[in-house]
Amino acid sequence: MPVATPNPSPARRRLLEAGARATPARERVLDLLLLATRALSHQEIEAEAHAQGLDFDRVTLYRVLDWLVTQNLAHKIEGRDRVWRFNAVTVTETEHGHAHFHCTRCGKVFCLEQMQPSFALTLPAGFQFAKAELTIQGLCPNCSDE
């Protein structure tokens, strides 16, 4: 039986609350996503993991990211460059999704969790809203200052 950690990391808590096994790879990748200020590509996650001294191979990283997405602990967003980016699903995020912002200059993708798609409230009769995926394109604060 695993020994309980007195102060588990936010990722470990999320994994345990989801009833999932908190493997070191799952915990570390989810920790990286929770700390990220924007959605990260597989390559960016791998580089950050290596910078922090975490050692797992690309296949493990792909599997962990796919598993986090299927468990609704992370989501993936396809950029205009056709590269998938990943971000942790936040506790405040609704089950209906949220909007994303893609900077057309630097290519970074940001989650706009506070912005919910209002068009879902005005669907024509007979349509039932389930989930929306909206990506807004433009310049992020760093690029718009240049």
Image (tube, rainbow, N blue to C red):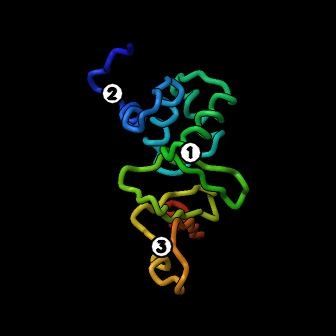
Q: Secondary structure at mark 2?
A: loop
Q: Is residue 115 above or below residue 1?
A: below
Crowd band around label 2 with a 10 angstrom C-alpha radius: few (<14), some (14–19), many (20+) = few
**Which image quadrant for residue 146?**
bottom right
Amino acid identity at mark 2: Pro
Q: Residue at x 39, y 32 (%)?
A: 16
Q: Is residue 66 above or below residue 59?
A: below
Q: Quadrant of residue 69?
A: top right
- Which x, y percent locates residue 131? 52, 65
**Would you name the residue on which mark 3 appears?**
117
Residue beneath label 1, please? Answer: 69
Say whether disc 1 or disc 2 marks the residue closer to the N-terminus: 2
128 or 90: nearer the eye? 128
- Counting from the top left corner in percent of width and height, residue 47 is at 61, 34
Which amino acid type corresponds to the residue marked 3 in the rendered image? Pro
The CA span between labels 1 and 3 is 21 Å
Separation of disc 1 and disc 2 at Cα?
22 Å
* Closer to viewer: mark 1 or mark 2: 1
Disc 2 to disc 3, how far (Cα)? 34 Å
Whether label 2 touches label 3, CB < 8 Å: no
Circle 2 is placed at which residue position? Answer: 8
